[in-house]
Amino acid sequence: MPETTIPRSQGRYTVSKPSLQDITTMPDPFKLLNTLRRACNAFRNTPGRRGRFVQIPDAESVVVAGDLHGNLTNFKKLLDLADLAKHPRRHLVVQELIHGGQRYPDGSDASHRALDLLAALKCQYPDRVHMLLGNHEMAQWTRRQILKAEEDLNQMFRLGVETAYGRHAETIYAAYEELFAVLPLAIRTPNRVLLSHSMPNGKTIASWDPACLHRDDWTDEDVGLHGGLYAVAWGRDTRLETAEQFLAKMDADLLITGHIPCDVGFSVPNARQIILDTQNENGCVCCFAADRPVTQADLEAGLVRLATGKHPAESG
Ligand SMILES: [Mn+2]
């Protein structure tokens, strides 16, 4: 697949033009619809789920990725690395699958294909595959405008669904919205590692109420600019004191988030938190034991760069 890096003024995405074959091998829309609906049910029925929070009841290990933004190459590498078939007590967590630089020849956003892959995986491993709602999915779902380089990302996503599914696009798009509506925003592993896309910022954390995560329903206020769910998807704070307050409210010890771009695939902003970014060629994930206590150093030791399959320190 030929790749070109678009000019800086258009953002940091790498644009890939899929071949004709990619387009002609789109899944049958009726099969996809069935898969998406089954996946939605599986998300609703995930063991340990309460509202938009999942307490993983039992796991030997967890593989968690940062933002993927439609990068199917990295998504497939992640699946190879996680190898869920061979590790029956391993869980996989992905986040922020949509928007970004993966485009159809007409320029529309091809990132919906990552949702298709996720849905198939959720059907295959309903108890062990998870996705965290990112701010981009939240924006698409709540129709809050999100721009990058003056491009309306929600509209580009819709156009991509139309490019792929033509007259079935509206029905498929509605199924994606249903999927967004059931995705959790926080997951806690058995050994108290909290996984979320982001965290509320320092100004709001004191008044932020985790109850918003424990309800199945939500209000416009929850997902609005000052809402509790909005804060978990859109925050930009990475200070230790904020992370500690968030972890205390979520009854967890360590935090792994995405959301913030990291050129080297990860960042360690404070003594409780690791940020993962899995969307580019340096993309990293974290693989860690979930059946025993872990430290921040253990989580750092579990970093893997997808391109090399090695710890980023060994990847050069
Ligand atoms: Mn994000």
Image: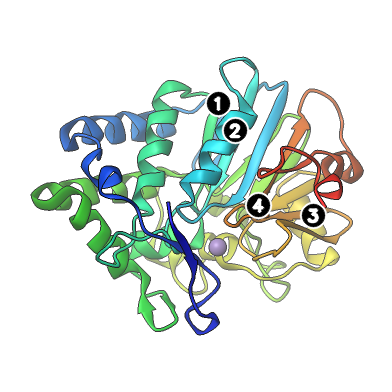
Proximity of marks 3 and 2: CB atoms separated by less than 8 Å:
no
With 97 as the anchor, is 311 left or right in this view? right
Amino acid identity at mark 1: Arg
**Mark 2: few/some/many CA within 10 Å (<14, 14-19, 20+):** many
Whether residue 100 can be seen here: no
Amino acid identity at mark 4: Gly
First in sequence: mark 1 vs mark 2: 2
Q: Mark 3 — residue?
A: 273
Question: To which quarter of the image does residue 234 belong?
Answer: bottom right
Q: Residue at x 45, y 53 (%)?
A: 70
With 21 as the anchor, is 302 left or right in this view? right
Instruction: Write down which quadrant ligand 1 falls in.
Output: bottom right
Task: For ligand 1, tell me if the residue under mark 2 lies within 8 Å.
Answer: no
Q: CA distance from mark 4 to mark 3?
A: 17 Å
**Mark 3: few/some/many CA within 10 Å (<14, 14-19, 20+):** many
Tell which tag, 4 or 1, sits nearer the viewer. 4
Q: Mark 1 — residue?
A: 128
Question: To which quarter of the image does residue 63 belong?
Answer: top right
Above or below 84: residue 156: below
Number of marks: 4
User: Which colouring convention does the figure follow?
Assistant: rainbow
Q: Residue at x 66, y 72 (%)?
A: 204
Q: Mark 4 — residue?
A: 283
